[in-house]
Amino acid sequence: MYVAAKVEVEKCTGCKLCILSCPEPNVLRYLPETKQVAVNQQRCKGCGLCVTVCSKDALTVSSI
Amino acid sequence: MSTKIITPVDEFADFLPQEYKELVARGPYRERRSVEDLGTFKEIIEEHPHCAGCGVSLGIRLLAAALPSPEDTLIVGTPGCSFFGLVQAALNYSNTAFGNQNAVATGLKRMLQIRFPHVHKDVVVVAGDGGIADIGLDLTLHSWFRREKITTIMLDNEVYANTGGQESGMSRQGQVLNMAPQGKRFSKIPVFEMAKVSGCVYGARVTVASPRKVGRAVRNAILVAREFGPTYVQIFTPCPTNMKFPPNQTLKVAKEAEKDHYTYEEFMSAEVAAYLARL
Ligand SMILES: Cc1ncc(C[n+]2csc(CCOP(=O)(O)OP(=O)(O)O)c2C)c(N)n1
Ligand SMILES: [Mg+2]
């Protein structure tokens, strides 16, 4: 898509709240190795719901 | 379940799309998965064409993750936005003529009980508010009166979203829509209350702003329907496109509704309560 979510790795604590707020399947994934969330930007529609639930301000939506 | 039906024979494995291979390797089939596990397994819903920030598609994603045994589940739907996501899913899905979902589900459930007497085949209706509360209301109520062992899940966006914004029986009083310029003149049809007096043995009213509650409600409803009778889950799934709010506000709209006309509520019979407590 034209815009997509991005995770700031310094801020993400891996709480997974964003994963439960995303309408798109298989876009936000939890990486057990780093205990953080990763975005599949190719499939993110950039709605920004994940941004609204992140209490650590670790997510932003911008053009890609 | 036997994963045989999804496991490709070696000769074909190379030709299958990546998504399919992931589903076989990391799908929710071998181990029990739930809403809490989202993000750690390959989901059975695939990329879909729902609008950005769509509440209906979030509802579908959550309910799909909550299915107790997706491989033995048959979803019955009807026209409306929900089928965009449901037809992109790795589960059995049957569409029906608009409003006929609970009648078709009844027939399928009875047939599956005869064909597989020793397996629980979950028949779950997933449809919009228009499909359930308007055109399908009579067939929905009659399936409840008959005590059919099926689960009905309403994805309530309070509008006919798929056809561009007509008022539904579940739209709120006063709601102005693309094709209801003067606002709706009567209040929401009390389908949740009707479920209580029409034979449903379990019911829950939730919103997508409380994903874990959605997961619990869906799982309870399906497990209870196997043993006792009809169950009903009503999920508020706000629609940014028709209600004309920005797509990043869907959860805020749902959260606010939880304090207003969409408070969390659950009902069940005494024997169902005892059964759920034992699980
Ligand atoms: C018999 C019949 N009448 C009308 C339609 C047109 N139609 C398709 S979807 C729809 C409304 C769906 O509204 P709802 O059930 O609330 O689902 P939503 O799109 O809001 O998710 C209508 C009227 C149809 N497909 N079949
Ligand atoms: Mg609707």
Image: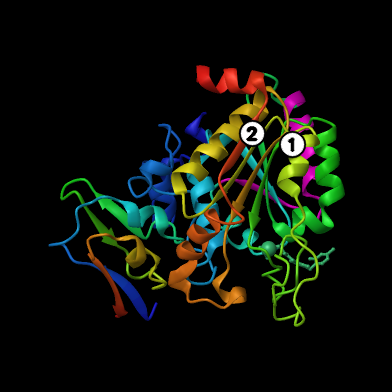
| Front-most of residues B101 and B218 | B218
Subunit ID for the residue under disc 2: B
Q: Where does label 1 land, which residue? A: B196
Circles 1 and 2 on the same subunit:
yes
Give the residue type at disc 1. Answer: Lys
In the rendered image, the vertical position of residue B243 relative to residue B68, given as above or below? below
Residue B3 spot, x, y in % from top left: 48, 33
Q: In terms of sequence position, does the residue under pointer 1 or pointer 2 come before the other?
A: 1
Pointer 2 local density, CA inside 10 Å: few below 14, some 14–19, many at least 20:
some
Give the residue type at disc 2. Answer: Phe
In the rendered image, the vertical position of residue B26 relative to residue B247, given as above or below? above
Q: Disc 1 vs disc 2: Cβ atoms closer than 8 Å?
A: yes
Residue at image x 79%, y 35%? B197
Residue B185 spot, x, y in % from top left: 80, 70
Q: Where does label 2 land, which residue? A: B267
Is any part of residue B98 visible from this angle? no
What secondary structure is marked by label 1? helix
Q: Which residues are magenta?
A: B91-114
Q: Locate ligand 1 by image quadrant.
A: bottom right
Subunit ID for the residue under disc 1: B
